[in-house]
Amino acid sequence: MDLRLLRKAELHVHLEGSVRPETLREIDPARTLEEIHARYQYEDFMGFLMAYKWVNLHLTEPAHYALITRRLIEDLVRQGVVYAEIIVSVGVMLWRKQEFAPIFDAIATEAERGAIPVRFSFDAARQFGVELGGAGGGVGCGVARARRGGIRHWGR
Ligand SMILES: [Zn+2]
């Protein structure tokens, strides 16, 4: 059996964690792919979090979120995914003082254009608070706190 040929559901993928180096280069063409690949290298969980943060800092406008949504859905379709639940790091956006509504509008609009049905789950690290209720389009709300050695999810 070739797993690549099976129809699949993606039930746990973080939008901001799905950004390929090539997509980041589309957002920031001044950087080289080599430089970006180097930033994606890490040896432990804290290194991963720093890489994740570095990627997030490049996402400064709704169009960036639309682009990473488009590229993620394209990747999923190539992998045979026919349904996806995508986690959006609302807590990071709020912590960065970004305006969530226009960003999510861009994400949702892009998802509607995609070839597969997509639902969203909003994620916030516990230290950022949980005042996210009422945001539209979500199927759940994940709350986690970064800890040395891992993230503990709760309340999902
Ligand atoms: Zn997760």
Image (cartoon, rainbow, N blue to C red):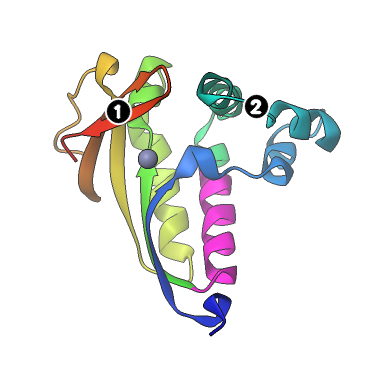
Sequence-wise first label, 2 or 1: 2
Q: CA distance from mark 2 to mark 1?
A: 23 Å
Which element is circle 2 on?
Answer: loop
**What percent of the width, then of the height, locates residue 118?**
36, 61
Check residue 19 for magenta coloring: no
Quadrant holding ligand 1?
A: top left
- Mark 1 beta carbon near ligand 1 (under 8 Å): no
Say what amino acid the circle numbered 2 marks: Tyr
Residue bearing the label numbered 2 = 42
Furthest residue toward bottom: 1
Say what amino acid the circle numbered 1 marks: Ala
Span colored in magenta: 65-80
Note whether 26 is above or below 125 in the view shown. below
Q: Residue at x 54, y 22 (%)?
A: 53
Q: How many marks are shown on the rendered structure?
A: 2
Q: Residue at x 47, y 64 (%)?
A: 113
Locate residue 26: give its quadrant. top right
Residue bearing the label numbered 1 = 124
Q: Residue at x 68, y 36 (%)?
A: 27
